[in-house]
Amino acid sequence: MNRPLIAVAALSLAALILSAVALLRGGMDSVPPGETAATEEMIRTLLREHPEIVGEALQAVMEKRRLAEEERQRLNIRVKARELNEDPGSVVGGNPAGDISMVEFFDYNCPYCRSSHESVSTMVAEDGNIRFVYKEYPILGDSSVIAASAALAARKQDKYIAFHNALMTHKGRLNKVAVMAVAEATGLDVARLKRDMTDPEIAAILSRTRTLAGALEITGTPAYVIGDRLVPGAVDAASFKALIAELRKDKEDS
């Protein structure tokens, strides 16, 4: 469970109980003291005999807060829709005219990004109607920045996706030497790639992505934005398919 959320919910529940006690003790002057005491004892007895009531109330508070948080996230995603889907620095794969947009924030040195890469790629290919947006989000050190910069530079040789796939399936950590070896194996002109990596626009793209991730409260990789839903962490293909089916149904019903 989410411990911070549990703590907040517990505090909310405690506040409700304290408010009820305060109401009984100080806010009902017209109620005879004997009846107030009897009511308090009745509440105590009820909680002793049915302690599950506290758990049920806590779950209700947590669910209410969860739904409010999801709605806040969705609103935030809608506000940032242009940066998510239309940044000219982000490569678009899958079906560019697809009915569902799926954005992935990733780091080439993230083991969870790598482990989910094949299943996500297969799902996008099999679906055939997903617009997939690549967002380099190198948060695991300088080597990750080098890999991200090289991938973005590969666009000028029209080999971004092939290079991206090769980096994601590389065995071992990617440093500058490994990145260049993968580039050469992918058929890139390495000398040109190194020159293109110094283009100020690449640093600008990475900066925009960091700012966007911060605005969406994305702190780790992988993270996916599908439609107006934020999905943090590695998720199995079945869960992605279920969410995409739900989003498509919502479109049909709206």
Image (spheres, helix red, strand yellow):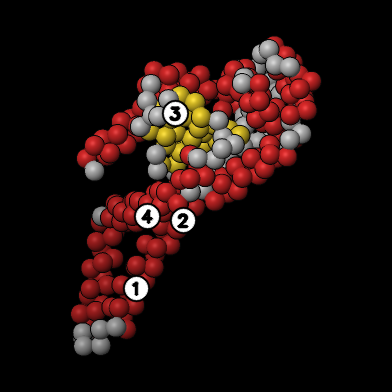
Q: Nearer the viewer, mark 3 or mark 1?
A: 3
Q: In the displayed structure, does residue 87 sit left or right of residue 37?
A: right
| Marks 3 & 1, CB-CB < 8 Å contact | no
Label annotation for residue 96: 3
Q: Quadrant of residue 58?
A: bottom left
Left or right of residue 154, residue 48 in this image: left
Quick check: 211 above or below 194?
A: below
Query: Dot 4, how many residues are within 10 Å of its Cα: few (below 14), some (14-19), or many (20+)?
Result: few
Label 1: how many Cα within 10 Å (few below 14, some 14–19, many 20+): few
Tell me the kind of residue under disc 1. Answer: Ser
Whole-Å distance between the Cαs marked 3 and 1?
55 Å
- Report the front residue among 78 and 70: 78
Labels 2 & 3 near each other (Cβ < 8 A): no
Q: Residue furthest bottom?
A: 30
- Which comes sooner in the sequence, label 4 or label 3? 4
Location of mark 4 (residue): 68
Secondary structure category for the residue under label 1:
helix
Q: Secondary structure at mark 3?
A: loop
Viewer-nearest of discs 4 and 2: 4
Per the image, the residue denoted by label 2 is: 7
Q: How many circles with numbers are drawn on the protein?
A: 4
Nearest to the eye among marks 4 and 3: give it. Answer: 3
Say whether disc 2 or disc 3 marks the residue closer to the N-terminus: 2
Image coordinates of residue 242 in percent, x first then y, are 33, 30
Horizontal side of 124 relative to 191 (left or right) equals left
Residue flagged by tag 4: what amino acid is it? Answer: Ala
Numbered label attached to residue 97: none
Front-most of 17 and 174?
174
